[in-house]
Each structure stands twice: as C-alpha cells, then as structure tokens.
Amino acid sequence: MPDFETLTLSVEDKIATVRLNRPDKLNAMNAAMWNDIRSAFRYIDETPDIRVAILEGEGKAFTAGIDLQMMLGVGAQVRDECDGRTRENLRRVILDLQDTLTSLERCRKPVLAAVHGACVGGGIDLISCADMRYCSADAWFTIKEIDIGMVADVGTLQRLPRLIGDGMARELAYTARKFDATEAKDMRLVNRVFESPEALRAGVREIAAGIAAKSPLSVRGVKEMINYARDHSVADGLNYVATWNAAMLMSADLQAAMMAGMSKSTPQFKD
C-alpha cells in the first residue's frame, strides 16, 4: 500500500475506506492531498481483493475545498518569461487536477462518498465523481468558486447538472448559496441522509458490504456501462453492453450465482 501524507486508507472485508486526514485544516485539499487521492484510487483499482471504496473525512468536516495556500502558489509554479508558456503551464495544472478527480470514475470499483459537516468548493467537484453520495443531517454544501472570482474548473459544472438538473446546478453555481442535507436529498445530490456522522459511517458501510458480496466482475461492468451511457446515446450504450456481455457474460461468477440460487445458498465469487 502506498504511503499517504494527507489521507488514510484501510481495507477490511474487501471494503477500502479512504479518509481525508487534515482535520486541523478542515481537510482543505492541498497539493499533497490531490496527489494522494489519485494514488489511493489507483491502488484501489489495481488491488483485486478490494471490491468497493468509501470516501469520508476526518474531524469536523468532509472538506473545506481547495487549500487557498495552494491556489496562491500556482502563479509561481506556472510562471515563465513567455506569457504563452505561462498560460500553457496553467492549463496543464488544471488538467492534472481534473485527472485527479476523474481517478474516482476511472477506478473500476464503486466509490461511495460519505459527507458530514462542510462540503465546500472542491469538495463538490470531488463527490460529483463518486458513484453514490450519502450525508449526515449536519452536512452542508456550497459551490464556492464564484465568491472568489473564478469559474469552477475541475468537474462540478460538467458533472453536477447530470446529477441534479441544469437549472438547479446553475442556481447553485451562480449564487454560491449554502444548502443543507435535506435540500441535497430533495435535489437528488445524495441518496440518503443519516441522523449523525456515526450513523452515516455505519449505514454507508452496510451498503458497501452489500455491494462487496456481489459478483465483482458484474459490479465492475455495471459501473463501466452506466458511465458510458451517461456520455453516449442510448443506441451507443446498448451496442456497448451487448459487446461487453458477449465477452464477459459466460463467467465463473454467472455459474456461481446460478448454482447458489438453485441451492438457496450464498454465492462465493473470485476477486
């Protein structure tokens, strides 16, 4: 397992728990955390005995968003005596940050985000990449970028409208207003609200355990198909799933599930 500076990663019962771990900074996302997030989800993707991942935060908040000290340092990082090269360098920094969050989508295993306390700015970008989102009753959210004079550029404006609808995404992005757990559920940003952070962690782990008991090959296929269908036409999606199942359907998992169904037993699947 890689070493991490700003998060912890534990694995138990085929469930990986990734916990943002800068509680003294409200888990603000500094440069090290961006790198750690990508490394963690690459590790989860590549480790056969991990079947599902939970993403949560340590301390009082899920995350306060991108670390402002990191933002202040970007100018020095990209500076070149040629203005064109400076702009190219900045574009590459932005693309790299985008790639970090896309690592959650690229990971073949489902990612369940468990949000408590504040989820600000870059935190919205982050959870928008997860397969499902859950929160505790104390959670609150805001797309904060407009308040610091910038356009959110690492995924919120691209992914959030597909989750909550175009009109609501525009309202939240234009106004930066805070919204609470109840509204997050009403707009379908989160699947479920739990009464406390403790109940959130227990509840999300129970959901993750249910996923981990299913055919890993099938779960990976479902994630692939849903992500593909989101970005393609219905016809393209149907064609792709036909091709996928032509390749993957006749698996040991299918046989194990069918035999277990006939014997009324619990199927056991290879990782």
Image (cartoon, helix red, strand yellow):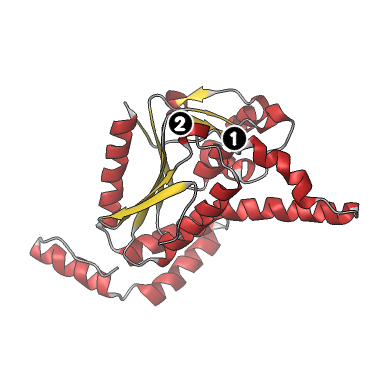
Label 2 SS: loop
Spot the residue most to the right. Answer: 82
Q: Position of residue 50 (x, y in %)?
A: 34, 60
Crowd rating for badge 1 (residues with CA inside 10 Å; few <14, some 14–19, many 20+): many
Spot the residue most to the left. Answer: 263
Quadrant housing the C terminus: bottom left
Q: Are marks 2 and 1 in contact (CB under 8 Å)?
A: no
Observer-nearest of 3 and 131: 3
**Could you tell me which residue is drawn at 40 percent across and 75 percent down?**
246
Observer-nearest of 93 and 231: 93
**Could you tell me which residue is drawn at 55 percent across and 37 percent down?**
28
Crowd rating for badge 2 (residues with CA inside 10 Å; few <14, some 14–19, many 20+): many
Picture disc at residue 61: 2
Observer-nearest of 250 and 54: 54
Q: Which residue is mark 1?
A: 121
Left or right of 175, for residue 12: left
- 268 in relation to 26, above or below: below
| Amino acid tagged 2 | Ala
Name the image quarter holding residue 223: bottom left
